Image (cartoon, grey):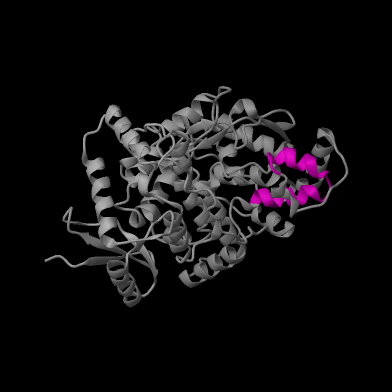
Amino acid sequence: MPKNFSLHKRGSIYYAQLWNPITHRYSTARSTGSLNRDDAVLTANKWLHEGLPDSISGKIRSALETMEVESLIASIRAAKLTAEDGQRIVQALRSLGLIDAISVRTKKGSEGFIDFLRRFWNYDESLYIKDKLAHGQRVGKRHAQDMTSRVKTHWEPFFRDAQLCDIDKKALREFSLAIAEKNLAASTINKTLIAGTTALRWAFENDMLQSDPSIGLLHFSGKAEKRGILEPDEVVALFKQEWNDRRAYVANLTASTTGLRMGEILALQARDIGEDRLYVRHSWGEKDGLKTTKNGDEREVPLLPMVRDCLLDLVATGPYSSSDSSYVFYGASKDRPMPYKPILKGLKNALIKMSLGESEPTDEQLAASADRWRSRGIDFHSWRHWYAKMMTDQAEFATVQKLTGHRDHVMLEHYADHKQKADFEKMGSIVTDIFGKITKDAQKPGTSDVSRFIEQDEREGSNGRDVALNSLLENDKAGREIGRTA
């Protein structure tokens, strides 16, 4: 004989399902609000003998009445109803004075919640994404993939058997508290919540739900971990090192003297190299390919002569025809630039060489060096912070904001106050004054070994010492570096 109720945990909260003798099934799970199993057992027994609180009004109803209603709802969901059947049900409810007016909705709200979320973030099938793209708004494949991953990791274990129409504010609040207990960063929790709340809001706006349960759901606050910035003498020393991959050297040099994002650097084509400036027109994403910049705007940034020479040399010595559309940072295919990982690896190696010297380091020394740079928060994206800080020491705030492609001034406010107004020529002069010292003493990249670079790009995995290096700058991940917001 089945037990009167069944208990299970979602996150740290116990849920109870009462046995329904009418349907011969356990009822929909209800939160007991208890973290302790014994307390949850007491709550479930209390529901059986004293009744259950209505989820909307809070009024107590006997367990039998609640079971009868659940049986009715289960029968409606199981029946093959037509729109006409739905209208008859609505009329019956209206005749009882339970509703005033309601539109007959589709059965979509009765589908599994997780199935709905998976389809919602499926880039090729999502009606939400298709609608956004049709209206000229941007939704990247990487973003959709990230949301899908968050659904699988966090939403699915908690709402595995839930129906879309069953999701309410209480369930969302308990879910948010459950993932908060995982000691994740506030930004990670908020992004995870967005994976579900965006879909629920869309479902309501498209008549799949009668209300939006995400309204009023509180987000989490917390201080983001600040990214570190190298000191000027460290930057000079870094570019004096010998880099194994000249493309990585030029990419980092370009980032340090222009403030470009990783995706913007990879997207650079021969046509984007001007006499005294770079034309930042595109960004590159591993999933999306060539696309617009992060904020959708094109911009121009001053370009130092030595950096320009390095960029043009890559174009001239690349394995493909040097056309205007040729990628500066060539890869294994003429239709794609190099992967981002060799650029990150080049920076890691140069940092270690700078701190350990030319002698062959031990594994312990490698680990200590990795810990040092990681503790300082140094990664490829640090170049944008370095550039912004150095430039705002001498240039007007709004001008630096335009050069770096920051649409939101908040991303620059912690680097500088308002400065003197300067036009592009003035900015070019400032760039020369600030970054000329770096390029003056920088180690010129060696001769091109194109075949080795291409083979390196095609080769998967790493060996020996490369594994030890992988721990360094572990926060340099594609999802954050390619097309990053800042």
The foreground one among 44 and 174 is: 44
Residue 12 locus on image (x, y percent) = 39, 68
Report the residue at 25% width, 41% height from top: 76
Answer left or right for 125 relative to 486: left
Answer left or right for 85 relative to 226: left
- Figure quadrant of residue 58: bottom left
Answer left or right for 222 relative to 361: right
Residue 395 locus on image (x, y percent) = 83, 44
> Is 302 colored magenta in this rendering?
no
Report the residue at 48% width, 35% height from top: 205
Can residue 366 be seen here? The reply is yes
Considering every residue shown, the one lying at the far right of the view is 420
Considering every residue shown, the one lying at the far bottom of the view is 38
Can residue 357 be seen here? The reply is no
The foreground one among 336 and 140 is: 140
Report the residue at 40% width, 38% height from top: 120
Q: Main secondary structure of the magenta part?
A: helix
Q: How many marks?
A: 0
The foreground one among 252 and 245 is: 252
The foreground one among 12 and 55 is: 55
Whether 299 is drawn above or below 260: the answer is: above
Whether 452 is drawn above or below 219: the answer is: above
Q: Quadrant of the N terminus?
A: bottom left
Answer left or right for 475 relative to 277: left
Residue 238 locus on image (x, y percent) = 65, 55
Considering every residue shown, the one lying at the far top of the view is 323
Residue 202 locus on image (x, y percent) = 46, 38
Q: Which residues are magenta?
A: 383-408
